[in-house]
Image (cartoon, rainbow, N blue to C red):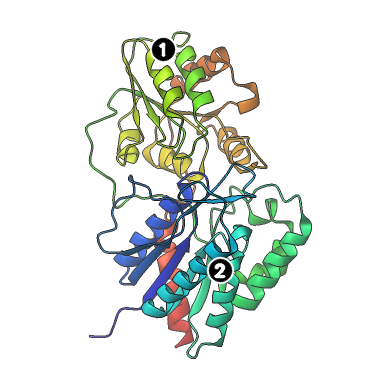
Amino acid sequence: MPAKPRIMIYVQHLLGVGHLHRVAAIARAMARGGFDTTLVSGGMPDPTLHGLEDIRFVQLPPARAKDASFRILLDENGAEVTDAWRGMRQERLNAVFDEVGPDAFLTELFPFGRRPMRFELLPLLARIRERRPRPLVFCSVRDILVDRTKPERDLDSIAWLQQYYDAAFIHGDAQLVPFEKTFPLAGRIKDQLHYTGYIVEQHSLPQTDAGDGEVLVSAGGGAVGLPLFRVALAARGLSSLRDKPWRFLVSRQEDPAEVEALRRSAGPGVVIEPVRADFPGMLRRCLLSISKAGYNTVMETLASRARAVVVPFAGGEETEQALRADLLAGRGLLQAVRETELTPQRLADAIDKALMTEPGRSNIRLDGADETARLVRHFLAARK
């Protein structure tokens, strides 16, 4: 019996956990597709991560961003990382790669983002290029990039992609948003770009009895949700769902004192609890979802056909959520309220409008994880 092809996947989440969960869905698809799969994470551990029984998971010494600017990295103790820490991380990543000996190596977002991690990725990519036989190298990138305020960085991305990578997998649908919408130089690398459809886990959904007939309010795994939670709590009494049960899923990264204040101000019929691993299953049972507009949450919402109101995150240089929310709202698939315009009354109005809309079946591709596994296998077979 031939040995399974080996793939090593690298992900570094810095603020929330969306990147990690999206890549975990890809890793599960790889394992289902017959790959010996290793997932290497450089971000803070996430207790809601699930479904990795058939995957080797490696936790590097973790790092996170100090804030939404992503300019300063902090270690697991909250101290700014040092050159010594970077050297230690680089050595650990190299050791994992040498131990796995993959046939294919996939980096999430880099070289289109995660520039702070180039201290460990560029040396590893240079080592891979010299190997014989050389592992194939792929990039995994979401549909929309953040605002490109420094064009020279786009030139770096192109140079690194052409020098080190065999292909870039765009986890989106060109019919909704083409990659050149937020990466204007995409034409220079069009032969390396392959659309997969959107990534949404549909095979490994946690079973749950929670969420039935509830309003779910969530903001992902970062520490950015409290303003939305406060407005949502105030909007409850103004909406037609004031008498329904509401459940707030709060990130463990939020300030505990602020979460406790939110809990004290909540009335009867409101549950406030930490984010849960069964959230995707809850979306399929809920009456309405109110959330940020992160990639994972929005795609899980579309897959579940839940009525939804989204409030795109607008901190730092982030423009990605607002663009995606506007495009989907324009198709009538959800309601969107800009974060800068968020008030209890506007949110209540959006809630009532969402309730009047029958959720339709989207024709947007949602099979991106399985398509990514198929593409990797195709590239490996073509090389042989």
Q: For label 1, count other residues whose C-alpha is less than 10 Å away and answer few (under 14), some (14-19) or many (20+).
A: few
**Visible in this render: residue 241?**
no
Q: What quarter of the picture does the C terminus occupy? A: bottom left
| 149 to the left or right of 201 | right
**Location of residue 281 (image quadrant):** top left
Q: Position of residue 45 (x, y in %)?
A: 39, 50
- Give me the C-alpha separation between circle 1 and circle 2: 46 Å
Reply above or below: 356 against 74: above
Q: Residue at x 47, y 89 (%)?
A: 133
Tag 1–tag 2 contact (CB < 8 Å):
no
Disc number placed over residue 120 in the picture, else none: 2
**Location of residue 266 (image quadrant):** top left
**Visible in this render: residue 381?**
yes
208 or 351: nearer the eye? 208
| Amino acid found under the numbered disc labelled 2 | Glu
| Amino acid found under the numbered disc labelled 1 | Ser
Q: Position of residue 349 (x, y in %)?
A: 53, 15
Reply above or below: 83 against 327: below
Q: Where is mark 1, residue-wise?
A: 265
